[in-house]
Amino acid sequence: MSTRERRKPGLWVVVPAYNEAEALGAVLRGLAEYLPRVAVVDDGSSDRTAEVALESGATVVRHAINLGQGAALQTGIDYALARNASFICTFDADGQHDPASIAALQSALAGSGASVALGSRFLEGSPGMPALRRATLRAAVAFTRLQTGLRLSDAHNGLRLLTRAAAERIRIRQPGMAHASEILAAIARERLRYIEVPTRVHYSAYSLAKGQGVSNSVKILFDLVYAAWSR
């Protein structure tokens, strides 16, 4: 076991990725201290996503076809659990998350007695967020509160830290963006203790083009309604 692995015992980072070759190298350089326990799930990409991940020293799990971010997350979580992960962090591949936030999630979880730490971009402001995106996420928070009873400030942040026990009790079945609401519904249903931790999100031209823009905001609301209807 390497020195880096000894410093981060039992923690795996799961990165779902679909055609993210342009941004993934920088993301993985930011996650260097967690390698090779970074599982990049290549969700049927047609670019060099898998190659970039391998060249960076990450572990790569591949879907033969594109199944959606929810499915990729579940694949990565299952992979980490099979390798005796004690903690699993979910982390986006488009460069919007700050790798330093993982340590903040770990510290907050360790002193809380909770089994899930959820990143929130609203606890300490959210500079640079497009107005429509902000409005959509506020609506998602209200909708999630009505559906689950969870009092959250951010319902669609892909940065989360789960204990092994929590990861084993959450099963993602929604393949698209509705998986975020499904995870929160499972937290409520299983009565898992959770905390929110302030995290920063970097909105770049790339991340906005990849899924942080207007069309994706509308899709989030559609998926929220669909997830509630199909539950």
Image: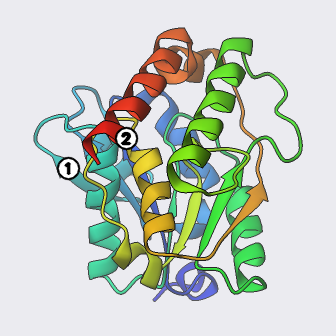
Can the viewer see residue 44?
A: yes
Q: Residue at x 35, y 73 (%)?
A: 80
- Residue 125 is tagged as none
- Please give the name of the residue rendered at 53% of the width and 19% of the height, measured from the top-left corner: 217
Residue beneath label 1, please?
62
- At 80% across and 22% down in the image, what residue appears? 128
Quadrant of the rendered structure where residue 52 is? top left
Image position, residue 67 (x, y; %):
20, 38
Residue 28 in picture, x, y percent from top left: 53, 50
Secondary structure beneath dot 1 equals strand
Front label number (2 vs 1) = 2
Q: In this orientation, which residue lies closer to the viewer: 227 or 123?
A: 227
Q: In which quarter of the image is the N terminus?
A: bottom left
Q: Earlier in the sequence, mark 2 or mark 1?
A: 1
Residue at position x 61%, y 76% in the image: 193
Label 2 sits on residue: 228
Label 1 Cα crowd, 10 Å radius (few <14 / some 14-19 / many 20+): some
Amino acid at the residue labelled 1: Arg
Q: Is residue 151 above or below residue 17?
A: below
Q: In the image, 137: left or right of 40?
A: right
Height in image: 190 above or below 62?
A: below
Classify 134 as above or below 103: above
Residue 160 place in picture, x, y as percent: 57, 59
Q: Give the class, few, some or many, for how many residues have Cα within 10 Å of label 2's Cα (few <14, many ≥20).
A: some
**Amino acid under label 2?**
Ala
Which residue lies most toward the right here? 124
Determine whether the residue tagged by mark 2 lies in a helix, strand or loop. helix
**Quarter of image, res 14:** bottom left
Q: Can residue 36 be seen in this view?
A: no
Measuring from the top left, give residue 145's x and y in whole percent.
61, 47
Rendered position, 10 above or below 120: below
